[in-house]
Image (spheres, rainbow, N blue to C red):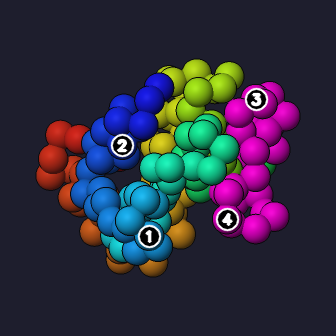
Amino acid sequence: MNVEELRNHCLAIKNAEECTPFADDVLVYKIMGKMFAFFLLNPKDGEHLVVLKCDPEKTVELRERYNGITKGYYTGNNLLWNSVYIQRDVPDKLIVELIEHSVEEVVKKLPKKKQEEYRNKLDNSNSKI
C-alpha cells in the first residue's frame, strides 16, 4: 500500500473529514469531530505509517504478530493506538480492516446520541462505516 491508497481508504469512510490541525505535513482523519487516523507525509525515517485507534486486547495480539505494528507514534505508551507501517509485513487488506476498526472504536466512545446520529447517516447512505 502507498500513501495515496492509504489516504483514499481513510477518505472512503462515510463522513470522514481530512484536516491538518498539527502541521501541514500531518494528515488527520476524523468522524463526528473525533480522530480515527493520522499520518505524516514526510516521516523522518522514510517509512510511512498510519496511527490508528485499536481495542487494547487486539493491540497486544497485532503487535506480537506483525513487525509493522508498534505502539502509536506520538500517542504515549498505551494500548489504544497503534502505528501501522504500510510497507512492512502488514497485508493491505488488514490495514483497511484496521482503519474500519479504528472508526468503530471511535464511534463506540461517542455519547449514545452521537452514535445514533452517526449510524443514521450510514443507514441513509449505502456506505460502509
User: Looking at the image, is mark 4 or mark 3 earlier in the sequence?
Assistant: 3
Judge whether 96 appears above or below 120 on screen: above
Residue closer to the observer: 70 or 93: 70
User: Marks 1 and 3: CB-CB under 8 Å?
Assistant: no
Name the N-terminal-most of marks 2 and 1.
2
Callout 2, which amino acid?
Answer: Arg
Is residue 62 on the magenta stretch? yes
Q: Name the spot of residue 69 as percent of width and height, x first.
A: 71, 39
Do the residues bearing badges 2 and 1 touch, measured as CB atoms within 8 Å?
A: no
Amino acid under disc 1: Ala
Q: Which residue corresponds to the image point at 50% horizontal and 49% vertical from the top-left?
A: 42
Q: Are marks 2 and 3 in contact (CB under 8 Å)?
A: no
Three-letter residue code for mark 3: Tyr
Q: Secondary structure at mark 2?
A: helix
- In the picture provided, is 54 more to the left or to the right than 120? right
- Residue type at mark 4: give it: Tyr
Seen in the picture, residue 28 relative to 55 is either above or below; the reply is: below
Report the Cα–Cα distance between label 4 and label 3: 20 Å
The mark nearer the N terminus, 4 or 2, is 2
Figure check: 67 above or below 30: above
Magenta-tinted stretch: 59-81
Query: Disc 1 designates what residue?
Result: 23
x, y percentage for residue 118? 30, 63
* Residue located at (46% from left, 65% from top): 35
The residue pinned by badge 2 equals 7
Q: Nearer the viewer, mark 4 or mark 3?
A: 4
